[in-house]
Image (tube, grey):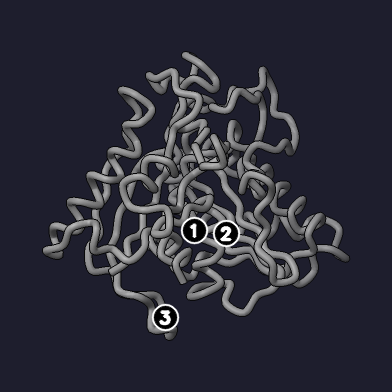
Amino acid sequence: MRAGVDIGGTKVAVCLASPSDGAGPPPLLVRMSEPTVKSGQPGALAKQVLSMLDAACARQGLTRDKLAAVGVAACGPFVRQAGLIELANPNICGGLAGAPRGLGNDWTRVPLEAPLAHALGQHRVRIANDAVAALHAERCWGALHGQQDCAYVTWSTGVGVGLCVDGRVLGGKNGNAGHAGHSFVGDIPGEPPLCGCGNRGDVESLVAGNSLPWRLGQSAAELLEAAQKGDPTAKTQVHVLCTLMGRLLYNMVAMLDLRRISLGGSVFLHHEELLLPLLRVELSRYFPVLTEGVELVSAGLGEDVGDYAALALLD
């Protein structure tokens, strides 16, 4: 039995599955989720993960020591303490940008690998950035299968990217390759909005689900639903979001010569019919020598990509 853990800025999900038979993603035997804990001591997140693993195992009549391996797909960025991964995610750690972001804690780092390895055994735990893990899953079982030059992009609470060039998944010195959500693609009128990381005016602060209530006074769902119903102001705002996200996608294509990009995350997948055509139009506006033939597609694993991302780390 294997376990997958998906740690996001909004929720933590845990699933159990048998190993894949190679023909497709493994069937999920148990799945459960909870809101991501953001109060108490920073160690509360690892305790939440272990508690959820215990609860998932109990549903199968198991104890966690019977798990062969645990894959953890976690929102980054990562930092390392004595070589072990800790999280410095702006949607979890309120101390990065301070009180204006209103997360209610002063965390700047959250220990993850050390407590999980202590409880589960170092050899049984594998941790990767959630977008990188989702890239693995999409290449194994989803819309990026067989692709050598590709990316997975999540547009959700935050904005994350997993990158593959010449068949090699990019990692970086701390496993943070692909944190394009904290890059810059241009300005909007007025004071640049504050990102949870402390930047002002980066991609996450402009388009991420967590930023829209602060910046526009509406949740992503409210804004996109209004646009789909024809509200002119909402439609204009959505076009601006897609212009900004489109610039990010173009920058990735221009720098890495990608052939296909798979898009996921709750903001995108819940409003795919509206957003995907706009993003395709935006990408096609740029230098055709670089963009011609580049495919923007929806995540083949859909809303299950987070669960399979963690499990794909174990294959």
Residue 163 vertical position relative to residue 84 in the rendered view, above or below: below
| Residue position for label 2 | 276
Q: Position of residue 7 (x, y in %)?
A: 40, 46
SS class of the residue under badge 3?
loop
Q: Which-is-in-front pick, marks 2 and 3?
A: 3
Looking at the image, residue 155 sits to the left or right of residue 291; the answer is: left
- Identified at 50% across, 57% down, the residue is 264
SS class of the residue under badge 1?
helix
**Disc 3 or 1, which lies upstream in sequence?**
3
- Identified at 72% across, 36% down, the residue is 184
| Residue position for label 1 | 272
Q: CA distance from mark 3 to mark 1?
A: 24 Å
**In the image, what residue type sits under mark 1?**
Glu
| Residue position for label 3 | 24
Q: CA distance from mark 2 to mark 1?
A: 5 Å
Q: Which-is-in-front pick, marks 3 and 1?
A: 3
